[in-house]
Amino acid sequence: MPRIEIMSHRGDDLFAEWGRETNPDDLKAIAERFKEQRAKGFSAFTAQTGNRVDEFNSDIEEDLIMIAPLIGG
């Protein structure tokens, strides 16, 4: 079952998890939350291959990791 985790100061926090049995309304909610995080500057990558992911796709079979925007000075 694929999942999205957000890297944080606590480690990795579970953001979402889905599978074939996940209903369409829940998938729509995950996609909207993913879009909101991206709008806040978060980046998403596949955990196994490191490919950047810009839009949620429920057909993806790899786990995703979201990383908060970095603020430098």
Image (tube, grey):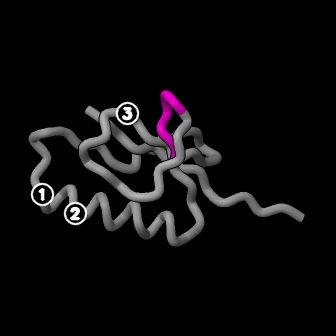
Residue 65 is situated, as x and y percent measured from the top left of the image, at 50, 42
How packed mark 2 is, by other alpha carbons closer than 10 Å (few <14, some 14-19, many 20 or more), is: few
C-alpha distance separating marks 1 and 2: 6 Å
- Residue 51 colored in magenta in the image: no
Give the mark nearer the N terminus: 3 vs 2: 2
* Residue at disc 3, secondary structure: loop
Of 54 and 21, nearer the camera is: 54
C-alpha distance separating marks 3 and 2: 18 Å
- What span is in magenta? 45-49
Give the mark nearer the N terminus: 3 vs 1: 1
How packed mark 3 is, by other alpha carbons closer than 10 Å (few <14, some 14-19, many 20 or more), is: some
Q: Label 1 is placed on what type of residue? A: Pro
Marking on residue 41:
none
Residue 51 is situated, as x and y percent measured from the top left of the image, at 52, 40
Quarter of the image with the N terminus in it: top left
Which residue lies at the image location 90% right of the left edge and 65% below the top edge?
73
Residue 30 sits above or below residue 12 on the image: below
Residue 31 is situated, as x and y percent measured from the top left of the image, at 31, 61
Kindly identify which residue carries mark 2: 28
Residue 68 is situated, as x and y percent measured from the top left of the image, at 61, 56
Question: Going by the image, does 51 lie left or right of 18?
Answer: right
Magenta-colored segment: predominant secondary structure: loop
Q: Label 2 is placed on what type of residue? A: Lys
* Residue at disc 1, secondary structure: helix
Which residue lies at the image location 59% right of the left edge and 50% below the top edge?
67
Marking on residue 24:
1
Residue 33 sits above or below residue 44 on the image: below
* Residue at disc 2, secondary structure: helix
Which residue lies at the image location 33% right of the left edge and 48% below the top edge?
16
Kindly identify which residue carries mark 3: 62
Q: Are marks 1 and 2 in contact (CB under 8 Å)?
A: yes
Question: Going by the image, does 61 lie left or right of 28?
Answer: right
